[in-house]
């Protein structure tokens, strides 16, 4: 709309910079691979669980934040509530579903994909979870499948 | 069915943003890949225009793609997709800048040469490109941010750049000229030092 005309010299040096940055700072291949793989996640036929609480969004008095290591998030899908707790220092993820039911959980994150089993009370633990994007896919015995929306740990 | 078969046609790059979004929403991987190819560099460059370390810039770009996949069937005005991606990228960057301890604190990055981002000058074959990237890395933060956004392809509108920088639109042209002057001066300096090649070529 309000394009401001550029001198020929300016245009030339900007074009040079554009070429230089494209060559010197290309999109990392793992970002491209991750982006491409995201379509597979969309294809999983499941009810989407929406984020409805994230402790990181809460106002915490300045002095207090440093003493809190775990991040708490809560997702909602229909009658299900999934609470998760992530400790980035320990790279540990804990989860609890209400109402209490056992399920299998597929952990999708930037670097990894693996599956863990919850106990009968609907509690699971996973180790070695790196910070970055995360989505959980919960598969109940012969029942529904729920996937959480993506969050960034 | 025909859509799926057609999608493997090399002509897929010629489809509009809206057509690609629709095919991707129907699970067509080739269409989704074409979108990632079309806007991958743009999203990355915008993420890079914020004061983020490498790992955080990656998280932000990846999150933008996840937001798109979550919304792929419901983008209202597909031809405005570049703007949607830019806005989403800004929102995600602001979020991590606001809350993440991994974000690089401003006081360490303002007005100093670029050390937080690894511009891989060693991998640049072209002498001229190496020189301009070395000069860019030596600029102050505000100029790096602004020039980075003016190099984005497909090009962002002035409105989008103004919004990303939180600057009045009228200031963009004059600031761009000033920053390009600084860039040219830095290139001259580097050339005088025999810089572009020695800096990149590795004297070790």
Image (spheres, coloured by chain):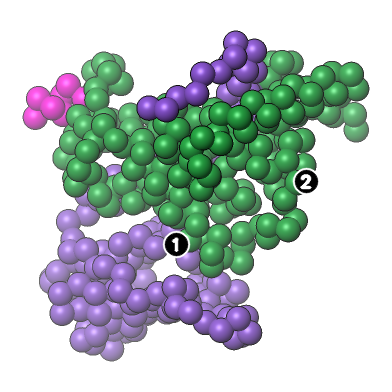
Tell me the quarter of the image containing the C terminus of chain B.
top right
In the visual, does B181 lie left or right of B33?
right
* Chain corresponding to green in the figure: B
Give the residue pinned by disc 2.
B112
User: From the viewer's perspective, is residue B78 above or below residue A121?
Assistant: above
Task: Check residue A119 in the rendering and tell me which mark sits there, or answer none.
Answer: none
Name the side, left or right, on which A13 lies relative to B189: left
* Residue lying farthest to the top in this orientation: A8
Query: Which residue does the image show at 22% across and 63% down from the upper left?
Result: A48
Q: How crowded is mark 1: few (under 14 residues within 10 Å), some or many (20 or more)?
A: some
Chain the render paints purple: A
Specify the quadrant of the image occupied by residue B80. top left
What label does residue A152 carry, if any? Answer: 1
Residue B4 is one of the magenta-drawn residues: yes
Q: Give above or below for B67 relative to B17.
A: below
**Callouts 2 and 1 in the same chain:** no
Q: Residue furthest left?
A: B1
Count of number-bearing discs:
2
Image quarter in which the N terminus of chain B is found = top left
Question: Where does the image place residue B12, in percent across and percent down from the top left?
Answer: 26, 21
Asked whether A139 falls inside the magenta stretch, the response is no
Pointer 2 local density, CA inside 10 Å: few below 14, some 14–19, many at least 20: few
Instruction: Tell me the subunit letter for badge 2.
Output: B
**Residue B51 spot, x, y in % from top left:** 62, 50
> Mark 1 — on which chain does it sit?
A
- What are the residue bounds of the magenta stretch? B1-7
Q: How far apart are marks 2 and 1 (CA)?
A: 29 Å
Secondary structure at badge 2 equals: loop
Q: Measured from the top left, where is residue A87 in percent x and y?
A: 53, 76
Residue B117 in the image: state x and y as whole percent: 67, 43
Q: Which of A109 and B144 is in front in this view?
A: B144
């Amino acid at each position: 709309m309000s394009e401001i005309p550029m001198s020929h010299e300016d245009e030339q040096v900007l074009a040079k910079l554009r070429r230089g940055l494209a060559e010197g700072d290309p999109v990392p291949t793992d970002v491209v691979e991750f982006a491409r793989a995201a379509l597979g996640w969309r294809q999983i036929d499941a009810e989407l669980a929406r984020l409805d609480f994230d402790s990181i969004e809460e106002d915490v008095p300045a002095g207090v934040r440093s003493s809190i290591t775990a991040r708490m998030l809560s997702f909602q899908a229909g009658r299900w509530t999934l609470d998760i707790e992530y400790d980035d220092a320990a790279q540990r993820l804990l989860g609890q579903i209400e109402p209490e039911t056992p399920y299998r959980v597929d952990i999708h994150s930037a670097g990894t994909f693996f599956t863990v089993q919850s106990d009968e009370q609907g509690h699971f633990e996973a180790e070695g979870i790196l910070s970055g994007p995360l989505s959980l896919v919960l598969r109940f015995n012969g029942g529904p499948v729920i996937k959480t929306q993506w969050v960034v740990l | 069915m025909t859509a799926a078969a057609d999608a493997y046609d090399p002509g897929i790059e010629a489809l509009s943003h809206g057509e690609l979004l629709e095919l991707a929403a129907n699970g067509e991987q080739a269409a989704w890949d074409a979108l990632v190819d079309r806007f991958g560099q743009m999203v990355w460059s915008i993420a890079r225009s914020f004061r983020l370390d490498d790992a955080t810039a990656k998280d932000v770009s990846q999150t933008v793609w996840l937001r798109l996949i979550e919304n792929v069937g419901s983008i209202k005005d597909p031809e405005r997709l570049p703007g949607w991606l830019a806005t989403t990228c800004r929102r995600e960057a602001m979020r991590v800048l606001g809350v993440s301890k991994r974000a690089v604190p401003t006081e360490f990055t303002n007005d100093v040469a670029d050390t937080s981002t690894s511009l891989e000058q060693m991998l640049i074959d072209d002498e001229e490109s190496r020189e301009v990237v070395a000069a860019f890395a030596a600029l102050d933060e505000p100029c790096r941010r602004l020039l980075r956004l003016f190099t984005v392809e497909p090009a962002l509108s002035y409105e989008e750049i103004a919004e990303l920088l939180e600057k009045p639109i009228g200031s963009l042209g004059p600031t761009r000229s000033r920053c390009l002057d600084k860039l040219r001066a830095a290139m001259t300096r580097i050339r005088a030092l025999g810089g572009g090649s020695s800096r990149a070529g590795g004297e070790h």
